Amino acid sequence: MYPSSCVAVSKKQQGVSLPNLLVWSGAIVILAIFGMRLIPSYIEFNAVKQTLITLANSPELRDANPREIRMAFDKRAAIDNIESVNGSDVIVDKQGGRLSLSTSYTISKPLFANFSLLIDFDATSD
């Protein structure tokens, strides 16, 4: 009889096989590519939304005409590095002394080969 310390205990192998590693690595790479393409668009959308909110709440622009408001948007867009929206894309609506600004735009980001991501954004100052 063998002492208990010498008895071989069979263990199930643990770990990741090469095919599983390749599949998971591929999935992570694809998600990273999507993230690197999408995140800048959403950062720019946040900048557009913040600019619209700032301009709508600005006391200097309460009595301004739509042309002046669009020019003010263009100036802020240049500072905030907004390239997808121009002042001419901004819809100005004044109701009861309250200024409401909105815009809608689409961004197409190339992914790889002939695949692109198409993203629609609607930003308002409300």
Image (cartoon, rainbow, N blue to C red):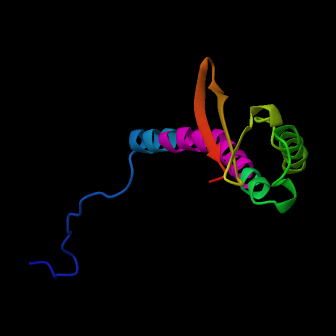
Which of 117 and 31 lies nearest the eye of the viewer?
Answer: 117
> Residue at image x 68%, y 51%?
46
The question of residue 28 being in magenta is answered with yes
Q: Where residue 50 sits: x, y (%)? A: 72, 55
Q: Is residue 16 left or right of residue 100?
A: left
Which of 84 and 57 lies nearest the eye of the viewer?
Answer: 57
> Residue at image x 18%, y 73%?
7
Position of 1 relative to 98 (above/below): below
Q: Quadrant of the C terminus?
A: bottom right
Q: Where residue 9 sits: x, y (%)? A: 20, 69
Position of 107 relative to 31 (above/below): above
Q: Residue furthest left?
A: 1
Q: Where residue 111 sits: x, y (%)? A: 63, 28
Number of marks:
0
Q: Residue furthest front?
A: 96
The question of residue 35 being in magenta is answered with yes
Please state the extent of the stretch shown in magenta in the rendering. 27-50
| Quadrant of residue 24 within the rendered picture | top left
Q: Is residue 98 left or right of residue 21?
A: right
